[in-house]
Amino acid sequence: MRLAFLTHEPFYPPSGGGSAEAVYLVEELVRRRHEVHLFCPKVVDPMAVESRFGVRLHEFKTWQMGRYASLRNFKYLAYPFLLQRMVEASARTVRFDLVLSQHAISAVTAGRLKDRLHVPVVMNFLDYLTGFMETWPSYLAPPPLLAAMERFELSLPLKHNADAVMTVSDTLADYFAAAGYPRDRILPIYYGYDSDLFIPKSLKPGHPIDPSPVMVMHGSFDHHHLGVIARDAVGLIAQRRPDAIFRFVGHRTPALSKFVEQMRKRSPQLRIECTGFVPYAEIASHLNSATIGIVPYEESTGTHCAFVAKIVEYLAVGLPVVSTPLNSALRFFGEERLVRFSEFDGKSFSQNILSWLETPLESRRALVPVAMERVKKLLDWRAISKNAIDFLEATQKRAHSRS
């Protein structure tokens, strides 16, 4: 089939968040000989990207896009309508068999295109975008406006009669079903990792072991990542284990800068490392020299719906994990012995970190093989992409037979 693939994130190299998934979905589509037209913000070397991935690029060049671009939120609001114009212009000469959108922002475009192009639409939601904003300061996300935005996001598939929906978690699937969209047209595909890149340190002979414990966290570092729970937990660990190091792998956002400033005032002896942005292919090297992976998310509808990539990648390299009790994480990793869930408070979170540090290294390592095998079997990007594209093909075939 000829497919229009819509995303608001630069396609390659992956910029963080859910952007890595697009690469593997496209690779699986092309491997099956589907023709992929990729509508996305401009990339660094478009000819090289087209050649490497076997796609036809349609680049958005009106302004810079990306999670760290200036005026990001205003650009996100306008982008769906400009993206729609791009796809409609291409559709004058190219007949698309299906439209696939990544994230809620592109889902707005996909929904509007369904009736205009008379083409099947599949919406892939890698998070509940507006649900994360519940932990933002009220001046950034006024509650009445936020409630309306959350309802709007959940209404997209039903409002536009999307042919199918893919979600990042079972929890998010439940939310769309509760909003009225048919549950039998929703497939949770989760979020994966690349087993060729995330290699356990136990498979790397001679890997140095830092005598000081390193607690690592990587990601986009928004407000919900580094709130009261993270501040309290890090402060308590600094008191109990002054030798501990906290490593933050990712772009130094205003939220991260504020967190570091607050923590250094609160605990001057605290040892903090900030790497800055790290390409997806290099994240594992920063995890492999760590001791424990942490996920101190604040509670919100968005975080409960998230299938946290951090947990997947920590387990992939054999790191013990401490996470707040996010619903989607509990449903998938609740029986995983290498993951310990705290309560939604800093004291409980710090106690779980300390309990891992007090667990003998041999005992920790004994838990790694089972965890590693499970994530590789179920959550390697190739397995997730196969499942997703099987669903996509079945949806297109079903829509075609109806028409």
Image (cartoon, rainbow, N blue to C red):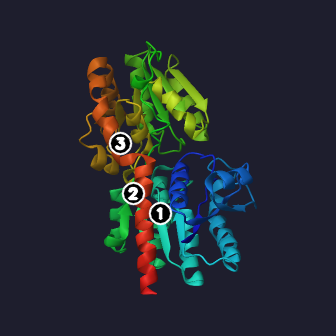
The secondary element bearing badge 1 is classed as strand
Is disc 3 surrounded by few (<14), some (14 to 19) or many (20+) residues within 10 Å? some
Q: Position of residue 86 (x, y in %)?
A: 69, 71
The secondary element bearing badge 2 is classed as loop
Which of these two is toward me, 402 or 7?
A: 402
Is disc 2 surrounded by few (<14), some (14 to 19) or many (20+) residues within 10 Å? many
Q: Residue at x 55, y 83 (%)?
A: 118
Label 1 sits on what residue type? Asn
Splitting the image into 4 quarters, where does residue 321 fall?
Answer: top left
Task: State the mark number for residue 189.
Answer: 2
Label 3 sits on what residue type? Val
Q: Position of residue 361 (x, y in %)?
A: 31, 18
Residue 291 in view (yes/no): no
Give the farthest residue toward the left: 335
- Where is 204 relative to 128, above or below? above
Of the numbered discs 3 and 1, the one sitting upstream in the chain is 1
- Decide: marks 1, 2 in contact (CB < 8 A)? yes
Q: Say which residue label 1 marks.
A: 124
